[in-house]
Image (spheres, grey):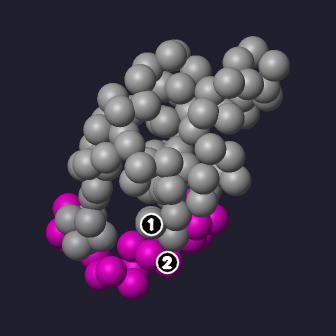
Amino acid sequence: MGKKLKLQEITDLCNCSTSQIQHDFVQVLGMSPLAYQAKLRVQYAKDKLRAGQSLVSIAMDCGFSEQSGLSRFFKKHTDMTLLAYQSKGDRMDWA
């Protein structure tokens, strides 16, 4: 999970153009490759928060060099802080 996959790596693997990959992502998943990768990182962080993993460990697993980077990223994509999300416990709809 920690490695950010670059669009060029995907195009090289698929032997397709960048524009074709971007078009296909939107057609199939309804979002750009970058948005999809962000969604996966947020979901991974949510899963690890529910499992009680430490914030520093989650940040490293998600490819951030510091917890603050994950905190900003998570807040931007969920409108919640890591601690607020983690403190909700079983009362939260985890979808």
Span highlighted in magenta in the image:
12-31
23 drawn magenta: yes
* Residue receiving disc 2: 23
* Residue receiving disc 1: 34
- Residue 7 on image: x %, y %: 30, 70
- Give the residue type at disc 1: Leu
Using residue 70 as the reference point, say whether residue 3 is left or right of it. Answer: left
- Give the residue type at disc 2: His
Q: Is 20 placed above or below 44 here?
A: below
Q: Which mark is residue 89?
A: none
**Residue 1 visible, this angle:** no
> Which quarter of the image is occupied by the C terminus?
top right
Using residue 10 as the reference point, say whether residue 48 is left or right of it. Answer: right
Q: Is 85 placed above or below 37 here?
A: above
Using residue 31 as the reference point, say whether residue 78 is left or right of it. Answer: right
Using residue 67 as the reference point, say whether residue 50 is left or right of it. Answer: right
- Residue 38 on image: x %, y %: 48, 56
- Front-most of 20 and 1? 1
2 drawn magenta: no
> Which quarter of the image is occupied by the N terminus?
top left
Q: Residue at x 43, y 20 (%)?
A: 53
- Residue 13 on image: x %, y %: 20, 62
Q: Main secondary structure of the magenta part?
A: helix
**Residue 8 visible, this angle:** yes
Q: Secondary structure at mark 2?
A: helix
Q: Secondary structure at mark 1?
A: helix
- Front-most of 38 and 70? 70
- Residue 43 on image: x %, y %: 54, 39
Q: Nearer the viewer, mark 1 or mark 2?
A: 1
- Front-most of 14 and 68? 68
